[in-house]
Image (tube, coloured by chain):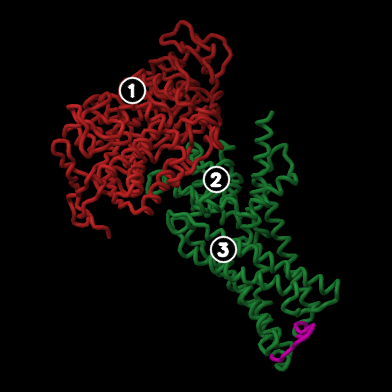
Amino acid sequence: MHGTRILEEADRLMTVCNSCRYCEGLCAVFPAMEMRRSFSDGDLNYLANLCHSCGACYTDCQFAPPHEFNVNVPKTLALARADSYAAYAWPRAFAGAFARNGLVISLIAAFSVAAFIFGFAAWHDPQVLFGVHIGPGAFYRLMPHNAMVVLFGAAFLYAIVALVMGVRAFWRDIGEPAGIKTGVAELFQAIRDAGTLRYLDGGGDGCFNEDDRPTDRRRLYHHLTFYGFALCFASTSVATMYHYLLARQAPYPWWDLPVVLGTLGGIGLLIGPAGLLAERWQRDPELTDGARRGMDVAFIVMLFFTSLTGMALLLWRETAAMGPLLALHLGVVFALFVTMPYGKFVHGIYRFAALVRYAMERKALAQGAAE
Amino acid sequence: MVDLSQKFDVLVIGGGNAALCAAISARRAGASVLVLEGAPKFYRGGNTRHTRNMRCAHDAATDILTGPYTEEEFWDDLLRLTGGQTDEELAKFMIAESKDILNWIVEQGVRWQPSLGGTLSLGRTNSFFLGGGRAMLNALYRTAEKLGVVIVYDAEVADLQIERGVFLSASLGQPVDGVTEVRASTLVAAAGGFEANIEWLKQYWGEAADNFLIRGTPYNRGSILKLLLDKGVQEVGDPTQCHAVAIDARAPKFDGGIITRHDSVVFGIVVNKHAQRFHDEGEDIWPKRYAIWGRLVAAQPDQIAYIIFDASVRNSFMPTLFPPIEGASIAELAGKLGLEPAALEKTVTDFNAAVRPGTFDHTILDDCRTEGVTPPKTHWARRIEAPPYLAYPVRPGITFTYLGTRVNRQARLVMKDGTPAANMFAAGEIMAGNVLGKGYAAGIGMTIGSVFGRVAGREAAKNARN
């Protein structure tokens, strides 16, 4: 009936859960489930991406393993979620990147870093590469600004196109609720829910990770990671505006906005991913999708290295190490960009889309009840 | 590692809501507390695992309760549903105490939520546990552990040393850390009823009990109840009675919980293995109808029955765990159910012919009824005529038993001669019969457990100090 064995299992579980409903107060997944009596592949992929993997429903479930009903919603939805990333990948030919994601991301990252180092070395004689460059435009003596813009702009644009195509396929598959258009209110609701990680709180007590005692650590680390990433992105945007609007060239002094934003974000992107990785390692194996850990680890490590190399570049930008560090940092960032549509990064995009869908369904339900 | 050879102030036997409330309340009163739970950790808590709400009196609406439920109304409900088989003093005491339980239980880490989708009319009277009964239990266990209550799982108590109404020690079936005899100043018995003890059920139900399905864990064997009654504690409640509902015959023998229930009787007819109807399917309104069908099916041959309905009502009730069995015709459906096709066709034809016109409304006792068929269907009667035809096979699902131990307002056990026990208390299902002689209303078992658990723990701690 369903496309995969995992979706078959997800369907079985949603049928069990729909006849119980004890968990409906924990998160968005169960109320969304209750709006349905049967589940298409799209429905299940929607529920899978709505799940934040807080683990509360597993800990609370009287039918969790070792019970013979074997109800493990977080694990099953994690597997279905990972499958859905591949199912909606654009172009289709690259869906295989999700199969051995850790390896693929590692290879691309290694290749990208090597290409930048090799490129720098081939382009410049050693005095330039290992020279000390200071003052405005220092970075651009190693790589012209326009070359950076073209290369990174193209990579970023590609990532955006691929992500948009993926989320479009997802949105079509999960089906727009009849008669409801996405309104500003639903978008804001979804932004609030995503921005606060509302559904990672296990219904209020925190999420379950290594045992049956709830904590809020994963949410904290995720916030550090996400807002760290956002600050770094803001830093780059401000720097771009400086460059084009104010004709001020990087590097900027430590007190200037791009550096302050980048430093704060960088610190978040060091602590956050390190914490998430530690939590990932301690996580109860019953709650994880096992073999697919590579995808999570690859993305977390990529973010960590992005920050680590960026911070190193900031610290040693006025020394002879600047050239190699710049190559390293640009290599990592380039790899991050091009692998965005083919790694764990997409979880944020699909989950946000699912939250928008959920906000719309709630509205439709409220309207239906009011009539 | 905890030293079980020490003498504890309070020994709690059991691991559900009542046991944990007793343990927490005793510990908060300063006692050293040991909890012996006979089940493994995953199955801890007996029937509490499968509960979802508690019925507490309250004078005003709260953020999760839609309106007031006064002590008087609670008492009226209890009086009606037990047909007067209740100890008025104890019941009124429990109802008064239940008000404070709404807050006290939250202080022990339990979280409330508004009534669940599909739970009909309980939003005003019943407070629901966020995440259900197991979430509630987990919270109580976390609190108990944090307070320093010692908890041992797989610790089945095989015997109790009781002399002249004085508890001395409990003997473990299997040694724990080399200890087989556990000593304590006081005992709180909170180990539930005997619904999972098929041999015991057979004493009253005969071989039919072999076909009963047990809704809770296999660990509710009533061994502590039996020991107490054998050792001179006064009994209360009808030993032959149990709460039974119709559950899917495909459910596991034990621990299918709430999700195997069927409440689709009103949408069709119910036949036995001879394809004959045997009771008015339109007799009563939820939740009473929900509670009578277990007993009715238990009285049928082989303790099996089939709810027969058609495609027109397929989505009229909550989705079920097991899908209905389908047939394009009544004869085909009969074949799949192992019933005589001609007999089922005749039953359905006769029923359809007897249906009078009316306006269907399953939320009230409507005017859709039959005429000229025995037994009649007095409400919600509509013809079964839209294929595919559908059926759920059902068996009696036993929830709990009524036999218990007599207690007083201190939750103190009362001996056969009417004297209060020196140092023994009881809480939960093991003494529910004091308040609930028969019948049931949603959430009342949890009220009994929390109120008397809290009282028993407090009194036991006080007793241990003296």
* In front of the other: A210 or B142: B142
Q: Which mark is residue B158?
A: none
Q: CA distance from mark 3 to mark 1?
A: 55 Å
Q: Percent position (x, y) of residue B225? A: 23, 35
- Left or right of A1? Residue A365 is right
Q: Are marks 3 and 2 in contact (CB under 8 Å)?
A: no
Q: Percent position (x, y) of residue B170? A: 19, 45
* In front of the other: A253 or A37: A253
Q: Is residue B354 magenta?
A: no
Q: Which mark is residue B86?
A: 1
Quadrant of the rendering where the N terminus of chain B is positioned:
bottom left
Residue named by callout 2? A2
Q: In the image, which lettered chain appears green?
A: A
- Left or right of B210? Residue B367 is right
Q: Amino acid at mark 3?
A: Tyr
* In front of the other: B173 or B148: B148
Residue A253 against residue B247 in the figure, above or below: below
The magenta stretch is: A130-141
Say if residue B274 shows up in the picture. Answer: yes
What residue is drawn where x is 40% and y is 38%? B50
Q: Percent position (x, y) of residue B119? A: 51, 31
Q: Percent position (x, y) of residue B441? A: 42, 27
Residue B149 against residue B78 in the figure, above or below: below
**Chain containing mark 2:** A
Residue named by callout 3? A221
Q: Is residue A133 magenta?
A: yes
Q: Element type at marker 1? A: loop
What residue is drawn where x is 68% and y is 89%? A319
**Chain containing mark 3:** A
Q: CA distance from mark 2 to mark 1?
A: 54 Å
